Amino acid sequence: MRVKLSNSALAIAAAVFAFPAAAQQPKRIIDVGPPFEAELVADLQEPWALAFLPDGRMLVTEKRGALHVVTQDGQVSPAIAGVPAVTYNVHGGLGDVVLHPDFARNRLIYLTWAEAGDGGTSGAAMGRGRLNPDATRLENFEVIWRQSPKVAQERHYSYRMAFSPDGQHLFVTSGDRWTPETAQNNADNLGSVLRLTPDGKAAPGNPLYENGGLAAEMWAYGIRSPVGIAFDAKGELWEVEMGPRGGDEFQKIERGANYGWPLVSYGDEYRGGNIPGHDTRPDLRAPEEYWNPVISPTSMIFYSGDLFPDWRGSALIAGLTSKALIRVTFQCTLAFRTICEAERFPLGGRLREVEQGPDGAVWVLEDGGKDDPAAGRLMRLTPRPKVPSTMR
């Protein structure tokens, strides 16, 4: 029996798990108000990303280095073997997970993580391996890309991935690593959105491909902390990023464009200094939407399902400090605007990931935060049952 709860009181029902090594997890329903209710499917340790397998199960990463299979009824597998060792710090750990477009044939999955370097440095890495038939091990795992240079900072790895709709290119976000000047330096691959082959190499046709080296990987640059990328229904790539003290941004990613960081921003320096606004440099690409105060975005999708028909074509963005799911519409009703935030749905916890399930349900991960990493949760959002008019 499902029990509907307010945000202030949770009733817990036991759920029996099929995986023998998994602890029991609570199954709970929270009525968070229109237009959906949230089912708390599983408790996790600092979850970071998820990807759906063809059979409807999920691969879920945890920041401290574990990769699990999780079923839609909340069964959590033991940690999958063969995952690379990670460096765990402020922003670093095990990051994103995506399937190869031809996963049904080759069973390849891609992971990103923070990798230790020399002298206390670290950087993002990306690799791929073959998931064995019983989903207990990654086989023949190999590193296929690295952030360069590694730096002695523990922030802004970013390392989100998205395959192009035709499956021919793998886009990777590479943050500025808390070193702003890197975003304007095409001699490194930081502060950029990169366009690679599925093997992790620079893709022919990139703006600086003929230059060779790290510059050949770059698709767009001048980007601070790109934490989410997704393709819309037209095949255009969009990105959401954390700004400095203010100025989170949502924007279309265009070939060779310079998005201005750290030359311009809608936010200010953490140390208190002012940054010129985007209007001072019309030669630099300005965002379609921005937030000040910030939402602290972490990931995004474009919704295409049937369960929430009013959301089709909208971007859904997960927020950390906002503790909310934010919907950005491309049919903005504000004057002189076509793209803007349309709705914000507080969920009460730090949202790390948002994904669309096979049936059109929306799945989100709460990471619990550094003060309570054990409070991470996987939730499924579905439309609220309609109340018969006789019961109103």
Image (cartoon, rainbow, N blue to C red):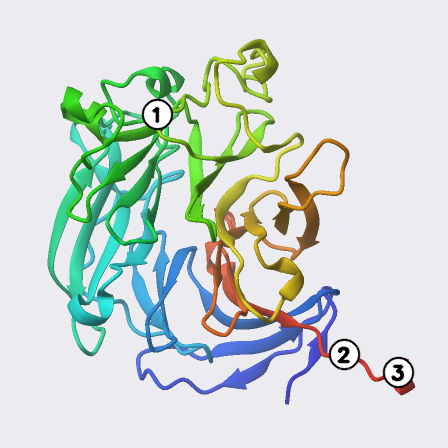
In terms of depth relative to the viewer, which is nearer, 47 or 251?
Answer: 251
Secondary element at tag 2: loop
Mark 3 or mark 1, earlier in chain? 1
Is there any visible trace of residue 261 in the rendered image? yes
* The C terminus lies in quadrant: bottom right
Neighbour class for label 1 at 10 Å: few (<14), some, many (≥20)?
A: some
Neighbour class for label 2 at 10 Å: few (<14), some, many (≥20)?
A: few
Q: Residue at x 39, y 39 (%)?
A: 91
Secondary element at tag 3: helix
* The N terminus lies in quadrant: bottom right
Give the residue type that dot 2 points to: Lys
- 62 left or right of 234? left
Vertical order, 121 against 274 (above or below) = below
Secondary element at tag 1: loop
Which residue is most to the left? 140
Disc 1 versus disc 2: nearer the observer: 1
- Residue 256 numbered mark, or none: 1
Q: Quadrant of residue 118?
A: top left
Counting from the top left corner in percent of width and height, residue 203 is at 20, 37
Q: Do the CB atoms of the residues marked 1 and 2 lie less than 8 Å apart?
A: no
How far is the residue under mark 3 from the one under mark 1? 55 Å
- Residue 386 numbered mark, or none: 2
Is there any visible trace of residue 324 in the rendered image? no
- Residue 206 numbered mark, or none: none
Q: Residue at x 54, y 58 (%)?
A: 303
Counting from the top left corner in percent of width and height, residue 3 is at 68, 82
Give the residue type that dot 1 points to: Gly
- Residue 389 numbered mark, or none: 3
